[in-house]
Amino acid sequence: MAKNPKKRVKFRQKLINKYRLVVLNEDTFEEKLSFKLTRLNVFVFGTLISVMLIVGTIYLIAFTSLREYIPGYSSTKLKREATQLVYKVDSLNQVLEVNNLYIQKVRELLTGEISEVLFDKDSVLSAMKFNKDSMNFGPSDADLEFRLDVESTDRFSIFNEATKSADIVFFSPVKGIVTDGYSLKNKHFAIDIAVKKGTPVKSVADGTVIFADWTIETGYVVIIKHSKGFISVYKHNIALNKHQGDMVKSGEVIASAGDMGELSTGPHLHFELWNEGYPVNPVNYIDFEQ
């Protein structure tokens, strides 16, 4: 059935019929503004406004920083920064695990938790888990005696050479009488210095405190890591002035000497000096005499 031509003409006529939009003053009924409009003009104008709003919104979202405020949206820069942070956190976790393992092993050495030792319990070597006699690369008893003779007869010459090669200067942690010296033969890898109880114990050089805690056998213990692979150990203290992780300067007070610990026989400082993982004779580097 064909559409009525009159209805089609009537609809077209409605689109082009002119209307007037008038803005009046409500009190005086004075005409302020007036617009001549048709339904077709209103439709076209509304369509254009809608298209412009849609295009403007798309532009703001796609090409401005406002897109980052849209829930669920993540920019390429943010993704890259998040990835880098994940890598950094993973690296820091690995470093932290290694440091914690290192500190745990040092603590076990000092507290005597590791058994089956062949060395003097008053030394850091007392907790090493290996049989020295079964290993052939170590020096013989004759070699040890020869080294002791050389050190005792030419001590200051050795000190000068060691200081030159190490490029580091050490100062005495305390002033006192050496009551028990360094002895490879007796496996006493330290010197004992008699002092009054409460005598300030000073760091022999600049470094970082890697251990500062109480042990049953040696009382309060401080271990400091220095440059050039040196580590100094201070035992039998009655109090600590530093904590693990602290940076110390040469001559800075780190503890108070005493006679704490089961292995102590009186007020003294048990001092050890290590280089690259091996004990060295402290008197070759430091003058302990008053």
Image: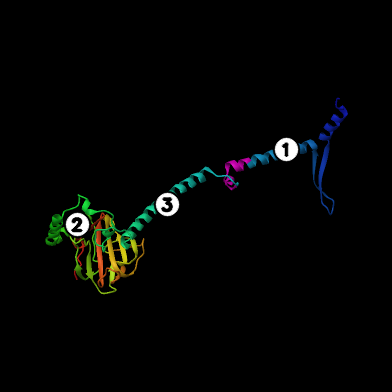
CA gap between label 1 and label 3 equals: 59 Å
Look at 23% across and 54% down and name the residue there. 132
Provide residue 113's location: percent of width, then percent of height: 33, 60
Provide residue 129's location: percent of width, then percent of height: 28, 55
Q: Secondary structure at mark 2?
A: helix
Magenta residues, as a range?
Answer: 58-69
Q: Is residue 106 above or below residue 41?
A: below
From the image, tell me which residue sits under label 3. Answer: 93
Residue type of the residue flagged with mark 1: Thr
Look at 27% across and 61% down and name the residue there. 232
Nearer-the-camera pick, 239 or 51? 239
Residue type of the residue flagged with mark 3: Asn
Farthest residue in the top direction? 1
Provide residue 29's location: percent of width, then percent of height: 85, 51
Q: Main secondary structure of the magenta part?
A: helix
Q: Secondary structure at mark 1?
A: helix
- Left or right: 243 as drawn, with respect to 125: right
Mark nearest the camera among 1 and 3 is 3
From the image, tell me which residue sits under label 2. Answer: 162
From the image, tell me which residue sits under label 1. Answer: 47
Q: Is residue 212 visible?
A: yes
